[in-house]
C-alpha cells in the first residue's frame, strides 16, 4: 500500500501561565513555541485550493496555528484565552492536533510535536 508522510514546521510566540502551578510558571510569561507536524496517509486528496486528488492535505491547512491570534492562529496570543484549557505544552499539542484534524480530510494520521523551550518538547498523537 502506498504511504505519504508530510512534515512541516512552524513557530509562534505566545504568552501563558499554568493555572494552579506553584512556582514561576504560574505567572504570566512568554515562549517562542516551535511545532513539528507530520501527516501520514495511504491516499491523496483534493484540497481547498486544488480540485484534483494530488495532496495528502495542503501544507497551508497544517500551518493555521502560525497565523496571528487575531486571524485565527496562536501567534502573539494569550494561550489561556485561546485554548480554553490549562495551557501546558501537553494541552497545547492536543489542541493543535484537534484543531488541525477537523480542517483536513479524513483518514490522515497526525503527530504533533511542540517545543516550549529549546530543550523541552512533547509529542502528541491519537
Ligand atoms: N510537563 C510540563 N512541564 C512544564 C511545563 C509544561 O508545559 N509541561 N511548562 C512549564 C513552564 O511553562 C515553564 O515556562 C517552562 O519551564 P522550563 O522548562 O523550566 O523553562 P525555562 O526556560 O524556565 O528553563 P530553566 O532551565 O528553568 O531556565 C514548566 N514545566
Ligand atoms: Zn511557560
Image: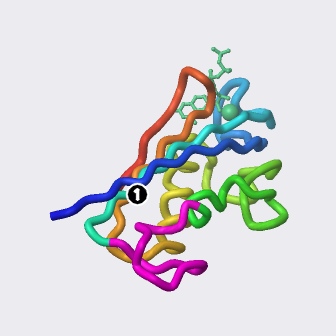
32 vs 1, left or right, is right
Q: Magenta segment, which residues?
A: 44-59
Q: Residue at x 26, y 66 (%)?
A: 42
Return the x and y of residue 41 as percentages of the image width and height.
31, 64
- Is 94 situated above or below 118? below
Q: Residue at left 79%, top 59%?
A: 69
- Quadrant hosting residue 109: bottom left
Q: Nearer the viewer, residue 114 or 20?
A: 114
**Is residue 99 located in the magenta-colored stretch of the structure?**
no
Name the side, left or right, on which 30 lies relative to 101.
Answer: right
Horizontal and vertical percent position of residue 125 = 37, 52
Residue displayed at 63% across by 45% down? 10
**Quarter in which the C terminus is drawn:** bottom left
According to the picture, the residue beneath numbered tag 1 turns out to be: 39
* Magenta-colored stretch includes residue 51: yes
Q: Which one is nearer the viewer's eye here, 109 or 46?
A: 46
- Answer with left or right where residue 112 lies relative to residue 72: left
- Residue nearest the observer in this picture, 46 or 118: 46
Above or below 23: residue 46: below
Q: In the image, is the residue at mark 1 within 8 Å of ligand 1 by its beta carbon?
A: no
Residue placed farthest to the top in the image? Answer: 119
Q: Can you give x and y, in whole percent of width and height, for residue 73 in the image? A: 72, 60
Amino acid at each position: 500500500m502506498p504511504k505519504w508522510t508530510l512534515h512541516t514546521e512552524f513557530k509562534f510566540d505566545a504568552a501563558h501561565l499554568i493555572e494552579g502551578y506553584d512556582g514561576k510558571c504560574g505567572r504570566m510569561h512568554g515562549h517562542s513555541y516551535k511545532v513539528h507536524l507530520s501527516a501520514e496517509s495511504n491516499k491523496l486528496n483534493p484540497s481547498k485550493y486544488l480540485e484534483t486528488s494530488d495532496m495528502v492535505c495542503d501544507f497551508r491547512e497544517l500551518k493555521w496555528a502560525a497565523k496571528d491570534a487575531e486571524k485565527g492562529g496562536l501567534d502573539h496570543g494569550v494561550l489561556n484565552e485561546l485554548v480554553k484549557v490549562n495551557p501546558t505544552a501537553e494541552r497545547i499539542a492536543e489542541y493543535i492536533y484537534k484543531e488541525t484534524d477537523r480542517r483536513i480530510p479524513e483518514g490522515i494520521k497526525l503527530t504533533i510535536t511542540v517545543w516550549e523551550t529549546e530543550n523541552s518538547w512533547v509529542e502528541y498523537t491519537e
